[in-house]
Image (cartoon, grey):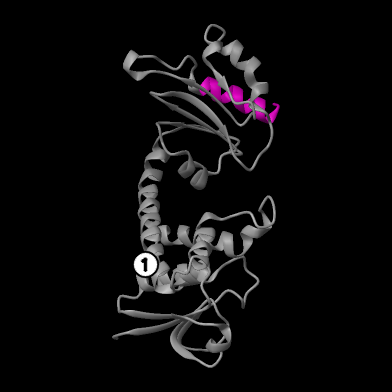
Amino acid sequence: MGKVIAIASPPDLDAVASVYLLKRAVKDEVEVKYLDHSVIEMSDADYILDSPHGRARIKRFDHHDTKEWTCSAMKVVQYFNMGGAEKRLAEAVCWQDNAGWRSLGRDGTDNLLDTALKSMMVAGFRSEEFDEIFKTIFDSLITKFEEDSKVITQIEKNIIFRSEENEVLTVKGDFPKDVIFQEFSPKFLVKVSKWGISVTRTAKLELPDLNDFKDKVKKIDSKGIGKWFFHPLGFYLGYSTDPDKNEKVPVDPIVFSKELLSFVTKK
């Protein structure tokens, strides 16, 4: 096909990510121009990204024509039937560009990718320069997401307790918390490994306070209660073991998980 011509709206995270994903999907050389919407209005190109203006000879990727909580980057992913790693990248972009603003704690709270891009613009970087820099960032994210997908299969095989409503999920192994919360969405995650046992409450919840679970832990492990750590904010508790000293977790993980389930559901 030769060189592909793409036009994108003035750079923001969605436009830059859409360009990156288009280049990843299209094997031919892609020439990209970031243009003001008034210029795009009078222009045509093979692909138009993140803009309702101009004429697209092949495809327009724009989220302004829908009521869905989506973004142009996600439309690129869906059109080219890209993989799970690319979809996760697009989800992060959609969060910032659209639906994310609905759930921010305060107006204007920073999304670090978006803030980094705007900082480069303020510092005078040209579009081709931050395209190159963000390619490195996005490539790294894609690699991370691809590795996550491999870990997910291992996590599934190591789930040793899971309540019906997913209030408590217990996993054997030192797997990344971010992957577990991203994929399985437990309300409380119990991790058991050679390093100890811990409970982490999802950031979506503010209650119950795990400090209130201390009395129950005392009954389960009366002798070792002094070694348990309870975070003052109540979202985490843990007991650390030293594998070099052959230390063991002082509680049965299944019994512990059932007690935790009883606590968080008040059953």
Reply yes or no: does residue 258 show up in magenta.
Answer: yes
Q: Quadrant of residue 194?
A: top left
Reply yes or no: does residue 81 show up in magenta.
Answer: no
Q: Quadrant of residue 111?
A: bottom right
Q: Give 252 or 129, whichever is nearer the viewer.
A: 129
Q: Position of residue 113 (x, y in %)?
A: 50, 58
Residue furthest out toward the front: 123
Q: What is the three-letter code of the residue carrying label 1?
A: Glu
Tell me which segment is drawn in magenta. Answer: 254-267
User: Mark 1 = which residue?
Assistant: 132
Which residue is at a point 58% across and 87% down the rendered structure image? 38
Which residue is at a point 40% across and 66% down the rendered structure image? 82
Q: Give 159 or 83, whichever is nearer the viewer.
A: 83
Q: Quadrant of residue 83?
A: bottom left
Element marked by disc 1: helix
Q: Position of residue 134 (x, y in %)?
A: 41, 63
Q: Magenta-highlighted stretch: main secondary structure?
A: helix
The C terminus sits in image quarter: top right
